[in-house]
Amino acid sequence: MAYPDLQTARQDAFSALPRLYSVQGRVQALLSLGFLVVELAVLASVTPRTIKRWADGGDIKSHDPARSLDDLFSVSRMLVADGTYSDRDIVGWFRSRNELLRRTRPLDALHAGDEESFRKVAAAAEVLIHPELLAQRFGEIAVSEAASPVPVVEAGRSPAAPVMEPDPSPDSVR
């Protein structure tokens, strides 16, 4: 099938095939996006050899990787479908510390495997796609901290002003 552009081909390959609902399909899609075998292994709490076996269609033995891999797949798919970022940018975003996740890497946050972590990573990805959602999703404080290149300081104090504490020793009074 001829595609008018690379983005259309990426979207079709990443989201349109039913095989992506299998562990094999998700692992293959994540590897083709640019994630490393070792990253997927850490995320699923298995060995790199197991990830390679799953990618080749091998059996899944007594471990349910679906949750952590599905969370990564779901957020990745959202970013790919948007079409704004390259595969390299998407994988780089997952590997980088994120201010909206309290300086945690999205990959590390997803490793927790709980619904709350998934929601936070998905919300941060939505803000990446639609920056105007920053205030709505994370409140006015997040907007001021994320937009400010300087540390937030107390009202009435300059960032350069030192905090002077009184010296309680008797020798300080002269």
Image (cartoon, rainbow, N blue to C red):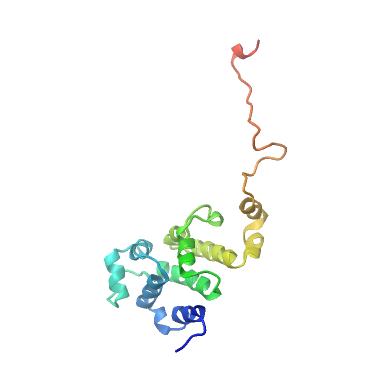
Q: Quadrant of residue 66?
A: bottom left
**Closer to the camera, 9 or 5?**
5
Q: Is 87 situated above or below 138?
A: below
Q: Is 165 situated above or below 30?
A: above
Give the position of the N terminus as an image quadrant. Answer: bottom left
The residue lying furthest to the right in this view is 156
* Whole-percent x, y for residue 48 in the image: 29, 64
Residue 55 shows in this picture: yes
Give the position of the C terminus as an image quadrant. Answer: top right
Residue in view at x 50 percent, y 73 percent: 80
Q: Is 25 situated above or below 38?
A: below
* Whole-percent x, y for residue 65 in the image: 36, 69
Residue 62 shows in this picture: no
Number of marks drawn: 0
Q: Is 163 situated above or below 26?
A: above
* Whole-percent x, y for residue 144 in the image: 66, 52
The residue lying furthest to the bottom in this view is 1
Residue in view at x 53 percent, y 76 percent: 81
